[in-house]
Amino acid sequence: MLLKRVLVAAIFVPILFLFIRWGGIPFLCLMSAIIGVALVEFYRGMDSAGMKLLSREGVMLGILLPISVYVGGAQVLSLVLVFIILFISLRQLFKFRVGASSTSVFLTLGGIFYISFLLSHVVMLRAIPGLGEKLVLTAFFVTWMGDSGAYFIGVVGGKHKLFPRISPKKSLEGFIGGILVSCLAIFISRFWLFLPFLHSVILGVLIGVMGQLGDFFESMLKREMKRKDFGSILPGHGGVLDRFDSLLFTTPVFYYYLKYLIIGA
């Protein structure tokens, strides 16, 4: 399993960084594809748990979000979300089926908000003039380094279970280790992106904590659905949603911290 994880990362990560470097339409297409596949995985998981959603509409509208923020900027986000909420609600209304209608609407919208809305912040981060490439690179690097640190430190020295009912293998030692590795990673990232010392410490802790909470949240969903992974497209990692679960929580935090406290993006 570890060998598979390493081999897939060795292939996938350079390709991802190449798209980050290119930016523009190629990066938008990649992020839209990632969001689309993650939504398909999420809706299939819900379907397997017996919950019938507006999956086709959810995937199409979910892909609309990153395209909208790329074309119109962050200021169009509220407008597009209102459109999505109204569309899904009216689509369910005109099916004229009362049974499980609230579940269908709210879980379809939940997938869009959880996956598409949160991951669209990667596109918004990349669009920041002059810094976008370095910021996205930093967000991915620090998040995934924190994930890896939590995993390996938990395997080697994990003795105290953190949330055993949600994720039995994760430990307090791994959680703390992930935060420390995230802090180390963000100081390494200062080689290509200068951040003031205090902000670096705060962001290292925030990303370390939020990344692992994102992982726990996804584990909670999988436990409810009685699934080990959301997919199998990435051997050793599971599905796309399994690989990007931490970034769902870390990227928006990173974006808004930068926007309001550092660069006024």
Image: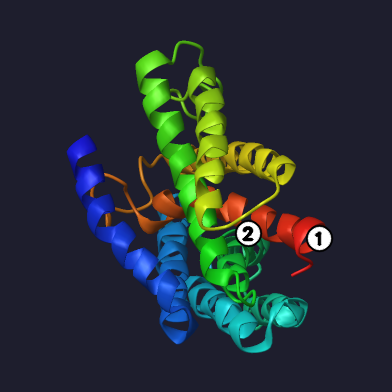
Most foreground residue, 189 or 104:
189
Q: Amino acid at mark 2?
A: Thr
Q: Is residue 3 left or right of residue 256?
A: left
The total of numbered circles placed on residues is 2
Most extreme residue toward the top is: 159
Give the Cα distance between marks 1 and 2.
Answer: 36 Å
Tag 1 and tag 2, C-beta contact below 8 Å: no
- Locate the N terminus and report the quarter of the image it occupies: top left
Q: Amino acid at mark 1?
A: Tyr
Most foreground residue, 46 or 50:
46
Query: Which element is circle 2 on?
Result: helix
Place of residue 124 in the rendered image (x, y in percent of width and height, measured from the top left)? 62, 72
Place of residue 227 in the rendered image (x, y in percent of width and height, measured from the top left)? 38, 42
Query: Which element is circle 1 on?
Result: helix
Residue 95 makes an appearance in the image: no
Residue at the disc numbered 2: 103
At a point 50% along the width and 42% down the height, the residue shown is 185
Residue at the disc numbered 1: 260
In this picture the colour scheme is rainbow
At a point 44% along the width and 77% down the height, the residue shown is 27
Q: Earlier in the sequence, mark 1 or mark 2?
A: 2
Nearer to us of marks 1 and 2 is: 1
Place of residue 58 in the rendered image (x, y in percent of width and height, measured from the top left)? 54, 73
